[in-house]
Each structure stands twice: as C-alpha cells, then as structure tokens.
Amino acid sequence: MTDFTSAARTATAALRDLFPQTPLQRNDYLSARYGADIWLKREDLSPVRSFKLRGAFNAMRKVRDRLPHQTRFVCASAGNHAQGMAFSCRHFGVKGTIFMPITTPQQKIDKTRAFGGEFVEIVLTGDYFDRTLAAAKAWCETEGAHFLAPFDDEDVIEGQASVAVEMLEQLGRAPDMVLLSVGGGGLASGVTKYMRTEAPGTQFRFVEPAGGASLRAALLAGRPMALDTVDGFVDGAAVARIGDAPFAALSWAFPDQVLMTPEDRICVTMVEMLNVEGVVLEPAGAMPITALQDLGPAIQGKTVVCVISGGNFDFERLPEVKERAQRYTGLKKYMLLRLPQRPGALRDFLMLLGPDDDVARFEYLKKSARNFGSILIGIETKAPENFPRLFARMEEEGFAFRDITQDALLGEYLI
C-alpha cells in the first residue's frame, strides 16, 4: 500500500463522522440502453449534494492536525466548494469566511449559510470570479487565515480519493471503466491516483464540457493552459485552467481519453434522468452519463461506473435546460419568417403546420419592406423529421424564412 492509498483510506474513515458512504447503484435503464452493467456513484446524495465536501473536510482536518491553533479558513466559491467548506466549518467549530461574486444566485448563498450557520460569514464581492478570488486571497494574507483551495491542493485531492475507496468496497471488484467529470481536476486526480494502484486494470474516461475542456488542452500542450474563453453553463466544471497538482496526477492520460460533451447534449441527459429516473442532476453531474453514448461498443458487456459529481440544480434554470435539450434533439426550431403584409397571410402560414407542430413563440419584429414584415417564430414538434416536411411546404408556398436555431449570435439577442 502506498502512502497515498493509505492516506485516502484514513480520509475515508474520518468522513464517517460526517456521513455514511454515498450509494453505488446499478441503473437498469442505462444498463439496458447500452448493453452494459452501468453503476452510478451518487455523490449527489452527500449532505451537500456534491463530492466537494470530501476534499474540503479532509484539507481542513489535516490543517487542524498540523496547526491546532488555526481556527480561521477562507475560500472563494459560488457553488459546491463553498457549501462543502461551510459544512466542514460547522463540524470543526471553526470560523469560515466565504467570498462569493456579487452575481451569485440567492439560493446558493442561502444554502451555504444554512450549512455553516453561525460559523461562516459570506462576503459578496466582484462581478466576476477572478476578482472574488483575488479579494479572498488578499483578505486571507491580511488576517492570517488558511486559504482552502477548491481543487489545487494535495489534501483536497486525497479527500476526493475517498470516492474510489468507497466504490471498490461497494462493488466488491474492480470495474472495467470509470467515467469522471473534470473541472479543476481534484476529483479525477484523486480517484485515478487511488485506483491505478488498487485497481490497475480499470480504464478511465474523463468528461469535460465542450466549452471548457481544460484537461484536454493541458494534455495536448504538456502543461496546464488557460483557455481563452469558457462557456459557463456547466458551472461545476467551467474551469479555464486545470490545477497544477491535479494535472501532475493526470499527466499520464492521453487526449483521446477525454470526451468533450456539448452543453446542449448535457441538457438532454438532465431532462431524461429527471423524467425517467427521478434523479436531479446539475450539469457537471450529468456529464458522465451523457458521454456513455460516445463509447458505444467499447462498453458493451462491461462494468462501468459513472461518478455523479453533484445534484445542486436550481430549478429556475429548468426552462433553459428544457429549451436547450429540445433544440439539440431537433424538437424545437426558431425561424425568422418574412411574412407578406396582406390579409390572411398568417392564416395561410398556420395552415402549413402539421398535427404535431405547435407555435411556442411568435413575435412581430418589424416591417422589413413595404409589403413584408419580419416575424420571430418558434415551433415545437414531436419528432425531428417533421421539420424538413414543414420547411418543404413553406418553400412550395413561397414563404421566405431563415432557420436561426443554431445561430449563436442571433439566438443571444432574439431567443
């Protein structure tokens, strides 16, 4: 047993003071769909609904062991790390100061405060996270507090490895493959570092959002690289630069082991798991399940574990998630329609709709010419093949239109 595996087991045992093992559940629906033995490690069922509690607790535990006088901790986070630290502060009875961007949703602020109670203070500062982080580190140096990093810390990585310790104990054997979401890299580095020693035959796939593939960029470059832009939709994994310590632990991986999942396709998984299985997932938590379809025959007949990293989902985002899922699956489209300015023109257009087509958005934009007007129209249907038939009928009847469903610029301003 290596020093790391021994430390990971010690961390796992210490966690039992906070909560029991999160469930490892076989999912019959996914197993039948992919012809494999699919298991879900349900980190969304931890006390703070994510794996982040593990790393925050372990790092705080080890700091307290080394420096018993250290009773002040600081972090910068707008999500799961903040909640994990708040929970840990209350457990250890230490003071925590949590810096969050001013734009943080009130729901996340309230949950963090509820987990920490009287032991945490929340400071809202900065419109963007980089400014929030800078303020937290400056305050930390001034006050002599300990900065609790979300992922770029060996003690945090050690704590996240407890996911693997539990997984192997619960399954009773080594799985053929494990799928892991990657943001800053703490979870992926902890799990793989433990399992490459204890289950060397297990393969890994790392799942990143298409708009934030920092691990893939680092593997291609041979070092951590800051992405020029990051799509913030997958807020639990939208990290511009993977951490140095996690990358050091993951540098053995090949770029083709990283699966990039489109943000809209992640939404399809979120809606499907909610409707079919009654499981609420945050975008980052849905990524491993989403990536299963990219593996195809490679997992047939195999035992596969998807680590569900979190389920902190604000239901105010559900309309956006449903919208993006419908667009991705071809069940909803938006068009700019050039409508003749004559009586009955709108009726003529509506008569072209099929029995499964429904108008979900109708907005008169402006007259684009003396005899024509521009209409923004959204159509929902029950099967994607209905749209080619509708477009053919529109062209036959002389209706000019432009499909803007995938036009990011126009979508941002009009949809």
Image: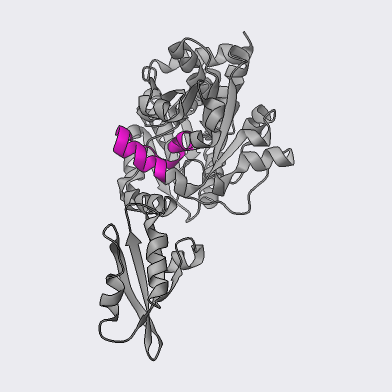
Residue placed at 60% from the left, 23% from the top?
A: 203
Which residue in the rendered view is the most extreme toward the top? 1
Above or below, comparing residue 207 to residue 299 in the picture: below
Q: Which residues are magenta?
A: 268-290
- Depth check, front residue: 79 or 311: 311
Query: Where residue 225 appears, x then y in whole percent?
Result: 68, 44
Q: How far from the left and from the top, in percent, is residue 197? A: 62, 14
Where is residue 49? Give x, y as percent: 37, 32
* Farthest-out residue, bottom: 370
Whether residue 189 appears in this view of the structure is no
User: Does 140 sit left or right of 393 as displayed?
Assistant: right
Membership of 273 in magenta stretch: yes
Q: Which image quadrant is residue 253 in?
A: top right
Residue 370 is inside the magenta segment: no
- Which of 256 and 136 lies nearest the eye of the viewer? 256
Q: Main secondary structure of the magenta part?
A: helix
> Which residue is rendered at x = 31% and y = 74% of the image?
349
- Residue lying farthest right? 222
Splitting the image into 4 quarters, where does residue 255 fall? top right
In the displayed structure image, the side of residue 155 where residue 226 appears, left or right: right
Q: Is residue 246 left or right of residue 120?
A: right
Q: Quadrant of the C terminus?
A: bottom left
Q: Residue at x 25, y 82 (%)?
A: 344
Q: Quadrant of the N terminus?
A: top right
Between 188 and 52, the one lying in front of the other is 188
